[in-house]
Amino acid sequence: MSKTSNSDTNRRKLLYIVTWNIGGLDFMVAVLWKLRTQYPNVDITVFFAEPHYDHVLRGGRFFLDLFTTLGIEYKDFRDLLPSSSQSLLKMFDPILAMSPLDYTTPKWIQRLQHFFNRRILNGERFAQFLDSFAPDCIIIDDRKYYLRPFCGYTELETYYNSHSHIPIIQIPHAIKSEYYGDLFPNRRLCEVWLPLVAEQESMIAVHDLEHVYQTFVPSLDDEWLEFAKQQHNIDLTSDSNIVNCIVLLEPFERMRDLHYKQNIKFNPKQFSYEQMKSYLHTLHDIQQIETKKSLYFWIKPHPKQDSKILKKILTEINLKNYRIIWDTNHGLMNMDMCLSMLTTAVYPFLVSRIPTIMIITHRIKVMPLPELYKNLTYSCQTPEETLNALIEILTTGHRNIEGDYQHTRSYLPDHALDVVMERLKIHLRLDNLEILV
């Protein structure tokens, strides 16, 4: 029998379900922080709908460290197993943690991981978890589950059908205006949060949907980013002659795409192997030029990228002094500068007033807010312009970039947290709970 709702207690329960990668977490992290610090009587559980949370985090620890600090519980499907099975699995944790996107492991390890995953993923145990936790509100990433449902999707729909008074909120997994439709086709959700209003007629006219709210991006609020700067988990060198540069990459073809290329229709919106190699060669070129300061590159791929093909490119161009990093941008706010291809991952660096060189590529036509990217202090159209911008910053310092902050804020305003907190006050009935200011 289901547990009763928490409406007659002095506590509330929020469940956030994370699927596929960290896109939704990047949007939600500031909300979880604000909610937990202002309303300690709200119990928050983050559930990674994977056999292991590292299938999402890929070794990054910013989120887990933050959750531990704030007292936010986090789980994955391993935590739903009997305690005896959990103890047995601990010895295989390095294998279970390997991301399916990394095609570097021997076949026998992949088969062993597949063997365990089939036994860890269990919809019935997820249904029991929902019944036991009895959330007052559920938040879930907005994705195309009709193409790839996560384990527990059917059980979540069943739970919702019998607990229709419990609000479910869909949140964006990226800073876009696309809306993929309600989580369950036959039921209207409580509401959908979108960071941007749809700009093209081909998209759903979100202003005609009464349950869709434009929230902008809470994790770009100044108050959150000031906090995140103090929580960084990357130790940078103290050498004043070294400039730490985060490099943000667009997605490009994966190793299996390259291997089976003759059978795959290439996506023109995506970079080819050779195109990405050409762009990354600029990093090598700057290392060959003598400047007052030298660069150390922290290379951050797209969350869906596999590491093997990226390492292959970096080896071929003979890049030195770099590290590949998968952690969230919110743990990288202590970087000296940013070199970014066209990705929404650049926004936190722009609004944190970190000098940013933007590489404008052919994908500008499919990006949301294209004018935002094209009108920055260092918006570069060619590899030569990018190289000259790097040389300028390393030799004479960067120009005044306050205009980049103001320009970005004209599209993505501050105080988005206020908007989503007002919505959560309604759904979690927070007015009757003690608030910490």
Image (tube, helix red, strand yellow):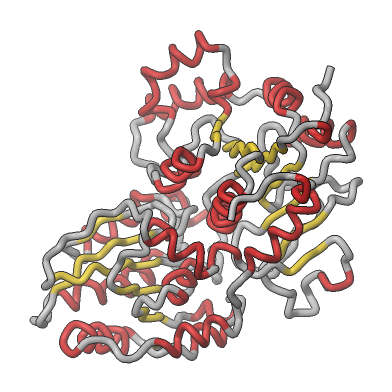
Q: Residue at x 70, y 27 (%)?
A: 133
Picture layout, residue 189 above or below residue 402: above
Q: Residue at x 59, y 62 (%)?
A: 174
Q: Residue at x 70, y 37 (%)?
A: 13
Q: Could you tell me residue 386's position as x and y percent?
A: 31, 84
Q: Could you tell me residue 290's position as x and y percent?
A: 8, 81
Q: Residue at x 87, y 66 (%)?
A: 209
Picture layout, residue 420 above or below residue 110: below
Picture layout, residue 360 above or below residue 188: below
Q: Which quadrant is home to the N terminus?
A: top right
Picture layout, residue 135 above or below residue 365: above
Q: Could you tell me residue 408's position as x and y percent?
A: 53, 82
Q: Nearer the viewer, residue 268 or 241?
A: 241
Q: Nearer the viewer, residue 373 or 260?
A: 373
Residue 88: quarter of image: top left
Does residue 394 appear to the left or right of 59 in the view shown?
Answer: left
Residue 203: quarter of image: bottom right
Q: Could you tell me residue 414's position as x and y percent?
A: 58, 74
Q: Which quadrant is home to the C terminus?
A: bottom right
Q: How many marks?
A: 0
Does residue 18 appear to the left or right of 106 in the view shown?
Answer: right
